[in-house]
Image (cartoon, rainbow, N blue to C red):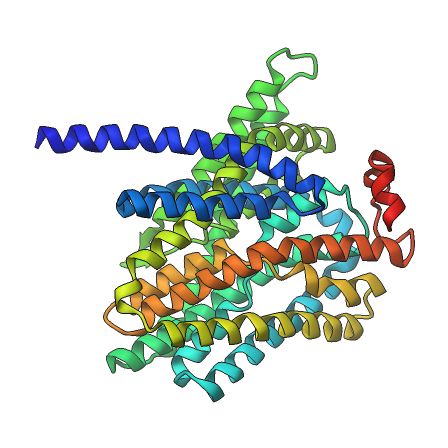
Amino acid sequence: MLVLAAEATSWSYQLILLLSITIIIGLFAGRFFERKRIPNLTAYILIGLVFGGVIVWAGHEEIVDAFEVIINVGIGFIAFSIGLELNFKRIKKRTKEVIIVTLFQAMFAFLLTFFALYILVLPLHIALLIGSLAIATEPGPILLITKKMHASGPLTDTLVPLHGVEDSITIMLFGITLSYAVSVETGSAFGPMEILTGPVLEIIFSLIIGLVIGYILVRIIRYLKYEDVEKDIVILISAIAAILASIAIASTGFDIFGIHIHLSPILLPMATGIFFSNLSTDLAKHETERIMDLFSAPILILFFSLLGAEIVILLAVSLQVIDLILILIVSLIYVVMRFFGKLSGSWIGGKVAHSDASVTRYLGFCLLPQAQAAIGLAFFARSSLSGTVYGTMILIVIMISTIINGLFGPLGVRHALMQCHGVDGNFCNIVHYAKADPERHHHH
């Protein structure tokens, strides 16, 4: 027993060593990629794929469980940062437009993916379930690249609030389609009550708890004097505590009247950020953003690297049980149809909502990255459909799509921001970016 414990401890320290090496390699690889005009996230994911290969080769696949926590912490930090960006005063006049565009691109991504899968390869209930996952996009790459390029303007103003709305649509549709899929696979009854209460309660409680934590954070930071020497430390610690509390509560959920309520690990930290951002002064918000940006850099490198590693390990673990040809066909259809759904939906939604030309033309390109939300839901689907052929298949299809969109998605975001800057100087402000690098400006 003791030997086993000692082995486990030494392996956990080896993991820490591996993680520290990953962060450093990630930092420099990211900088190298940036110079070659490829977003640094692509570097992090590639390093993750290699890192996953090393772990599989060393035979330590069980380590995936340890990743789960780090990945959830990463997503919490990203979601909180997105919440901070969401200023209601700034988007008040865009609310209707954001909702219309989000609904259109979500519905198109869902319907195109679902129909193609259903007609070509999969049974109805599984095609519906995978279709619902096509809606989710990964806010991380979008947030990082818009920040790095100092982009502002109609496109980024539409992008940021879109995630909150989109996350809610995904949760609702996924909840309904999963209940239906489980009832088909197990032959149990399919009742409307349980289906709706789950997702609706998840969204409501995520918002309420986010409001409470956000409000506490505002009160703490209110008491700070501007001349306080330790101001930065207090802000940093309070913000980290708020984010970690949001992540922990979201990941454990709670029971009310005998119903277990899951909370969204994206929606809850995002709600905390949103309420904090809108209830505190501009100065407090600005200071918090500045400090959190520095702190979250290593977390983001780890987040994207581990995501890549997790994909490799899960593929390796489930290779025996899966039908590779079917998975490749489904993945291909999923990636292609989701791409067309996002582009056409954003375009039509933009036309209906009379959006800016930059939004109509380029928003779809910004919605390609997909990771934690979809993977988290796919994990959930796998455990709900554990006795069936489809559980692991859904997870692996989403993972493959994540790699493809993770490598090419950030290029789409970058392309969109560069292009909408080129459409007309007022559309997207990348002035800072252009000034910082005259060479780069020269090429466009």
Horizontally, is 363 left or right of 389 in the view? right
Which quadrant of the figure has residue 438?
top right
Q: Residue furthest left?
A: 1
Q: Residue at x 83, y 38 (%)?
A: 432
Left/right placement of residue 217 relative to residue 66 reads right
Residue at position x 39%, y 85% in the image? 123
In percent of width and height, residue 132 lies at 49, 71
Q: Is residue 56 visible?
A: yes
Return the residue found at the far front.
57
Q: Residue 343 is drawn in which quadrant?
A: bottom right
Q: Is residue 278 visible?
A: no
Q: Is residue 177 above or below residue 22?
A: below
Q: Which one is in front, 18 or 226?
A: 18
- Horizontal and vertical percent for residue 285? 68, 33
Q: Residue placed at 64% from the left, 61% from the top?
A: 367
* Residue under the image location 91 percent in, 56 percent down: 424
Residue 423 x %, y %: 89, 59
In the image: residue 333, left or right of residue 178: right
- The quadrant in which the N terminus is found is top left
Q: Nearer the viewer, residue 428 or 21?
A: 21
**Compared to 335, does 282 lie above or below?**
above
Q: Position of residue 59 (x, y in %)?
A: 26, 45
